[in-house]
Amino acid sequence: MTVMSNILQFYTAHYPIIMSLVWLIGAGLSSLKWQSNGHQIARSTHGVKVTVLLAMFNEESTILETLTALTKIQYANYDVVIVDDKSTDHSVAVVSQWLAKQSNTKFRLIPLSQNIGKAQALNEAIKHIDAPFILATDADALLAPDVIDQLLRQVTSDRVAAVTGKPVVRNRTTLLGRLQTLEYLGIIDRIKRAQASLYGGIMTVAGVVVLYRREALLAVHGFDRQAITEDIDITWRLRKQHWQIRYAADALVYILVPETVKGYFKQRVRWSVGGIEVFLKNKAWVLGKGYLHQKLLLLDMFFSHIWAWFVMMTLGQYVVQAVANQTFSLPGGVLFLYTVLFFVMFLQGMIQDKHQSQVGIQDLFAIPFYSLFYWLTALVAALVSQFQVVFFYQQKGSWESPDRGR
């Protein structure tokens, strides 16, 4: 019993430290890998046509800013398709009026006659697209002018099906917004880089900025309208057909994040439920026929969820012992190492970011809360999502109006 208790405590305390080291090493190796690639656009994709695709539903307050950003893309051979999933606000009227004032013929609006959900709306739009590459984004996101060039630089093989870019938080009016700024810079970017360099591919594309090969999308019959998170789901269905998934850290998109606790946790629980959904759907073939890097990605997901339960068991054990012995002590050495590693991760993130995220002094005040914030929210989201899947799960993808900050 004592041995099991020690193993439990060790895993609980050291899992974040081990993963932090993996992310740091992997992110460091990624820079060397990309430098060796020369950052040159592959000849097979040079000048190829790219269609920017965005699905909208009740986006009247954000869509014009997004469309304006799309007019500034510095790539000659691109067009834009906006598919409206039967919005109930004035989104269609707003876009139609904007299009009427444009001399640019690159933009098309496809209004659907009924609401069918984001995934199916994207599928319907793809039927009207003949470009070999499709850049999917959201109706509240601002793509960087050079985003297409940066994404195409990672298409170095005919088997590359998707390349995702790097989200940068643009609303930082609250502590929660600033914490997410640090999270995207210091953690999420570390994870993506590490997965790309150590696992041979990333776990999931970011649906807000991802370049798809149209041929690959058609090969897996498009997006699954029943998936909770269509971006996680499509990543693994492409992977199942042995397509490659890449990460382009210099392909930027400026996003709005939740700035209320309710909105934030709702988003993270949804992501976590989507991850569990993908795990359950893919565990059999990955463990049976999948490549080593696919097994590592799936095990990474599994161990993170197991860790959440270990934390709860260890915490319960600690409280019982503390009350019985009337002693309350914390593992100072572990906490110190944990804090140092997260500071190093943030420092590495700042160096590799090259000021792309435009982190200011006011954002740095959130650093003392930074590491605790990430692991605490990961813990809660994992536990709540597992509870939802066991007791309330229904496979149904649908539109929701997100919390976009203040």
Image (cartoon, rainbow, N blue to C red):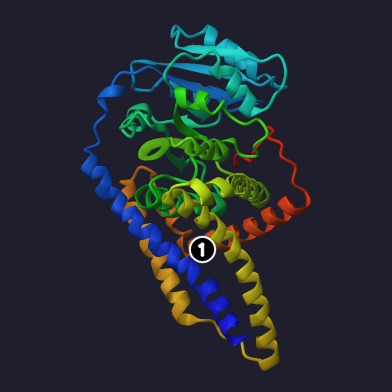
Residue 42 against residue 255 in the figure, above or below: above
Figure quadrant of the N terminus: bottom right
Q: Residue reaching furthest bottom? A: 325
Residue 376's x, y, as percent?
58, 63
Is residue 355 left or right of 393 when viewed as pictured?
left
Q: Which residue is mark 1?
A: 369
Q: Is residue 373 visible?
A: no
- The reply to whether residue 121 is visible in this rendering is yes
Give the tally of numbered discs.
1
Check the image and report above or below for 161 versus 132. Answer: below
**x, y percent for residue 270:** 64, 46
Image: 25 above or below 339: above
| Residue at left offset 41%, top offset 73% | 337
* Residue 202: quarter of image: top left
Q: Mark 1, residues whose alpha carbon is within 10 Å: few (<14), some, or many (≥20)?
A: few
Find residue 94 and report its horizontal and vertical position in percent.
Answer: 61, 16
What residue appears at the point 49 percent right and 63 percent down from the top-left corner?
Answer: 371
Nearest the camera: 99 or 198? 198
Instruction: Give the secondary structure at mark 1.
Output: helix
Q: Residue at x 36, y 32 (%)?
A: 151
